[in-house]
Amino acid sequence: MQSEKIQKILFILPTCLFLLVISIFPFLYSVYLSLFQAKLTKMHKKFFIGWENYQVLLFEDDTFPTAIKNTFMIAFSSITIEIILGFIMAKIFFEIRHIKFSNALRTVTIMPIMLTPLCVGLVFLYILNPTLGIFSYILDTVFGIEPFAYLGEPIPAKISIIVINSWQWTPFMMILLLAGLMTVPNEQYEAAKIDGANWFHVMTKIEIPSILSFVLLGVVLRLIECIRLFDIIYITTKGGPGIATEVMAFFTYRTEFRSFQIGTGSASAVIILIISLIVTTIAVTLLRRVERNEGLN
Amino acid sequence: MKASIRKKAILLIIATFITLIFLAPNLWMLFGSFKSQNAMFALPPVWIPDFSYIKNFTIMLSESYTYLLNSIIVTICSTIVSLFFSLPTAFGLTFFKFKGRFFLADWILSTRMLPPVAAAVPLFILFKYLNLLDSLFALVIVYTAFNIPFAVWVSASFFKKIPYDLIEASRIEGASWFHIFLKIAIPLSKGGIATVAIFVFIFSWNELLIALFFTVSESRTFPIFISAQVSQAQIIWGNVAAATVIQSIPPILLTIFLQKNIVSGLTLGAVKN
């Protein structure tokens, strides 16, 4: 029995130790660092200042509050767009699922999800080049709209980030909701047909209720991704113009690694951490509940 | 019947247009990688490039092959190490009935959802202290840590498909847990493990943030090399396009293999096929 116990421990313990050192320790150390004034280049000269970093971040400077606002604005807009377009696309692909060619189309459609976010940013940086990009050319020749710096003006830059983000992730919502639509029993569609229900009734009374848990799952998973949104901002706008597209993760990077202010940076990291923990708790509860019910089937 | 065929044909055309929206930007970059700097931004645009023009690729590869090699090494190593840690743990969490296993699984999952940027500086200090900054080893360790939670949860969702009777029967015959893990669980979940490996591979391949913090020169990965091209005053877009294409090849090819299991993987095993 003793060896049985040792075996079981060998299966599980190494991973736990690994995660404790590389995952949990750093997060706790961030909390510790956030109470100090410290520079990454002069680590031995740090001194304790208590809550001052948080004070400065949240109340004395406009940048971080704007970053929080932008992060959630981008998250909310992108996820809304992704759900609406994702649902429409899922419906279309659901209707033609028996046609072989639609499988090939679906595979191509979901490719952006797995692409390196950095590359997605670069592709759009190339397309959106203000003077010579293909987007300007189409806008000019087809609609007669004068090209301008799409990533250089506050509102267009925000819209561009949302568009790029949704472009990459709408396919995710689509395949998720497609999986959801597959779970609707065929009899329900037939019963609705016999009752003479129109498409709107079918959608609101049958489809939406049965895919609601899929939508919820999608929203939570996407929210976690949006909170850590970094790569696309880093390569396209760098938070600009001004602080128009500043987001939490990029702000933290900038503070820690461009200005080397790791005290302030850690404070902002801790705030991101707290926000993530709230979303994570919801997500873990949700995933655990789904898992106990033997998956969303 | 006729009406329904016509409806399907129209929907198929719409679906083709949708697909184009998600394909065209990438295609434009791919075409760009075969153009000279002038042709890339010519007005009116050069729609179809001369595909025999591969100078961008040859320049790019000769300048960057060490970084590309770094990326390949880090990605493969962290995939293997992640699986080495995760598979036994996933197996244990699925089949050992001990108290607190749900809590443990939740704890592992929650580490996956925490933002990497919040761990970057402490890890930087840790590795600096260990004199491991700017080393591929450090990257492998960190990527592994960030991938383990994902790998544990998704592998567990595949292990759960193994009939419990099978495990029970081997137990009665006196097989050790190691034996059951290696001879029963792994062979029966080959497809699932491949899915996990592909996802972990792509996550590591795509990583940018941690590499930005950790790598200075020798251990720079390919994404870092690409982003450095863009921060120069004069962007040489032909090179950037070629690098983007090279960077995109593994994710695109691997997505084709994932097909059936992609939803399951992206939802951490919550959605089954």
Image: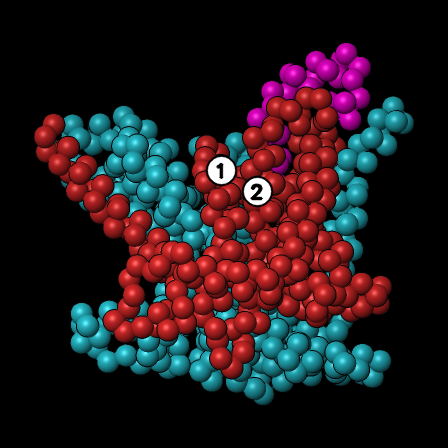
Chain colours: A cyan, B red
Give the residue type that dot 1 points to: Phe
Measured from the top left, where is residue A42 in percent x and y? Answer: 79, 82
Q: Which type of secondary structure does the marked residue at label 2 adopt?
A: helix
Q: Residue furthest bottom?
A: A60
The one of A269 and B56 positioned closer to us in this rendering: B56
**In the image, farthest residue toward the left:** B2
Q: Residues within 10 Å of mark 1 (few under 14, many from 20)?
A: some
The mark that comes first in sequence, 1 or 2, is 2
Is any atom of residue B252 visible in this view?
yes
B179 within the magenta span = yes
Instruction: For the residues labelled 1 and 2, say whether their Cβ atoms are less than 8 Å apart.
Output: yes
Q: Mark yes or no: residue A248 visible.
A: no
As measured in the structure, the alpha-carbon distance from the residue carrying label 1 to the one carrying label 2 is 9 Å
> Residue at horizontal 73%, vertical 15%?
B170
A201 lies left or right of B64 = left
In the figure, is residue B52 to the left or right of B182? left
In this picture, is B187 found above or below A224?
A: above
Callout 1: chain: B
Image coordinates for residue A141, horizontal then vertical, percent: 19, 72
Magenta span: B153-180
Residue at 89 percent of width and 27 percent of height: A2
Q: Which residue is mark 2?
A: B198
Chain containing mark 2: B
Q: Which mark is residue B257?
A: 1
